[in-house]
Image (cartoon, coloured by chain):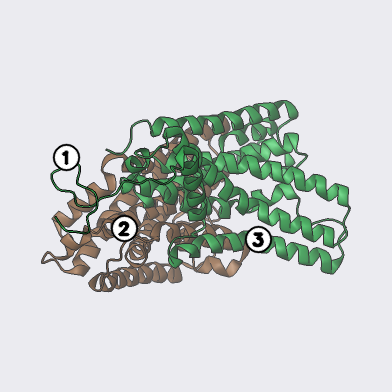
Chain colours: A green, B brown
Amino acid sequence: MPPETTSAPAQDVIHNIGYRNYSGARLGRSYARRSLFSQSLRGAYGLGRSAKSKVLPMILFGVMCLPAAIMVAVTVATKLNKLPVEYTRYAIIMQVVIGLFLAAQAPQSVSRDLRFRTVPLYFSRPIERVDYVTAKFAAMVSALFLLTATPLLILYVGALLAKLDFADQTKGFAQGLVSVALLSLLFAGIGLVVAALTPRRGFGVAAVIGVLTISYGVVTTIQSIAFQRDSFDAIGWMGLFSPITLIDGVQTAFLSASTAFPEGHGPSTAAGYVYLLVLLALIAGSYGLLMRRYRKVGL
Amino acid sequence: MYNATVARLTYRGLLGRRRAFILFGLPALLLTVSAVVRVLVGADDGTASSVLGGLALATMVPLIGVVAGTGAIGPEIDDGSVVYLLSKPVKRPTIIFTKLIVAIGVTVVFSAVPTLIAGFILNGNSQQIAVAYAAAAAAASVAYSAVFLLLGTVTRHAVVAGLVYALVWESLFGSLVPGARTLSVQQWALALAQRIGADGAISSDVGLPLALVLLAGVTAGATWFAGRKLRSLTLAGEE
C-alpha cells in the first residue's frame, strides 16, 4: 500500500481507485428547470451557441425592430400627431418575420434533443416531464415575446419623445403588449407541437412554416372570394382557421384594434368570444399535446 | 448519369415514414379548398385563377420544392451518412443529377398534378386555366428543385434559406418592388402559364423567351454548381 493513502480502503471494494462522492449542495428540481429555461431562451437567440447560429435570429430581430425605428424617425421628423401604425397592427404586418423566427428556432429547441437522444438524459435528472415541457414552452414564449414586444417598446418610447398624448399612447401600448403576449403563447404552442413531432430539424422548419403560411394563404384566399361575393359574415368567421387571423380577430373584438381583414370586416363582439375561446383552447391544447408527446420518448 | 440505387435511397428518404405527411397534407388541403370554393361559389374563372395563382403556385409549389429539394440531400449531409454514398465509385455529378430527378419527380407529383386536378374541380379547365397553371407548377418545380438542392449542399440551414427566398423575396419583395419580380421563379413560370392560358386570363411580368432562358439557365447552373460543391464537401460537426 502506498504511504500517502491515509485511510484504509473499505472492505467491500476490491480496488479503491480514488473516486470521490459529490458532497456539495444538491440544487434540485427548480434549479434544473430554471437552467433549462434560461438555456433554451438564450439558445433561441443563438447565445451560448456558435457564431453561425447567432446570424439568423439576430438578423430577424433586427428586421423586426428596424421598421419601428423608421416609423419613430418619420413621426418625429414630420411632427405627425399619431404613429403611422397602431401598436396592435405591428405584429400582423411583420408576421412573416415572426413565422420565420419561430420556424427556425422551435425545431432548434426541441428537435435536436430528440435527434441526439438527450431527452432521456434530461429525465435522468431530478426534473420531470412537466418541468421539461414547461421550461421549453416558457422559453419559446419569452423568446417570441422579446421579438414582438421590443419594436412596440421602440414605438412607445419614440411616441413619448415625439410628445404624443401620454394616456393615449400608454393605452395603445398596453393593448399591444396583451396582443403580442397572446400571439407569443399561441405561436410558441403551435411551433413546439409541430417541431416535437420530428427529430429532423429541416422537416421541422418546413412543417412549422407550412402550418403558418398555408393556413394563412387558405384563409385569405377564401376571405377575398367571400368579399367579392359580398358575404361579409363569412369573412369574419374564416379568420378562426389561421393563427395570425385568430389573433387579429381577438384584438379587433377586445383590444380596439382595426382589423386587417378585407375592408375591415372583422368579427363582431359575439364572434369575438368564440375567437377568444378558440385561442385559449389552442394554447391549452398545444400544452396538452406536448405533455402527451413526452410521455414516452427517446429510448 | 442516372443511378437507380441512389434514386431508390433518395426516394425512401423523402417519402419514408412520417415525412410524407407534409407532402400529402398540402395537396389534400388544396383539393379540399377547391372543392369547397366550387360548391360555395360555383365555376368562376377569376376565382379559379386566384386560388391556383395565390395558393397553389405562390405557396404550395415553393413549400413542396423546399421540402423535396433540400430533403433530397440535406438530411444525409446533416447526419454524415453522405460519406458512405460519396465513398462509392459513383460520380458526384451523377449523385446530384439522380437526386435532382427524384426531387423534381416528387415535386411535380405532389404539386403540379394536384394543381391540374384542382383546376378541373374549380372551373373545368375553362380558358385553359387548369392546364396553364399545372404547366407553370411543373416548370417551377424543376427550377425550385434544382435551386433548393444546391442550397442543401451549400448550407446547413438550407430549409430556412429556401423559405426566406420563397416567402420574403418572392412574396414580400415581389409585391412591393416590381424589379424583384423579374428574378422570381414564380413569375418565370407564370410567363409560361400566360402563353398557354386564354388571352388576358393570366398575366406575368416577364416575357416568355426570357423566362424560358432563365428557367433553363438557373436549373442547369444550380445543378452544375451543386455537383462541384459535392466534390469538395466538408463535413462539419453539429454546431
Residue B182 at x, y percent in the picture: 52, 68
Output the chain of dot 1. Answer: A
Q: Residue A228 falls in which quadrant of the image? A: top right
- Where disc 3 sits, the SS reads helix
Chain-order first, disc 1 or disc 3: 1
Q: Position of residue A64 (x, y in %)?
A: 62, 59
Mark 1 vs mark 3, CA separation in Å: 67 Å
Is residue A191 shown to the viewer in this render?
no
B110 sits left or right of A152 in the view: left
Left or right: A204, with A238 as reference point = left
Estimate the x, y position of residue B234 in percent, counting from the top left: 27, 70
Q: Residues within 10 Å of mark 3 (few under 14, many from 20)?
A: many
Q: Nearer the viewer, mark 1 or mark 3?
A: 1
In screen coordinates, is A147 left or right of B198?
A: right
The C terminus of chain B lies in quadrant: bottom left
Question: Label for residue A65?
Answer: 3
Q: Secondary structure at mark 2?
A: helix
Quadrant the N terminus of chain B occupies: bottom left
Q: Which residue is mark 1?
A: A11
For this rendering, which residue is in front, A106 or B33?
Answer: A106
Residue A71 visible from this viewpoint: yes
Marks 2 and 3 on same chain: no
Residues packed near mark 1 inside 10 Å, few (<14), some (14 to 19) or many (20 plus): few
Name the residue type under label 3. Cys
- The residue that appears at 43% across and 54% down in the rendered structure is B62
Q: Disc 2 versus disc 3: distance between alpha carbons?
A: 32 Å
Q: Which residue is mark 2?
A: B74
Quadrant hosting residue A230: top right
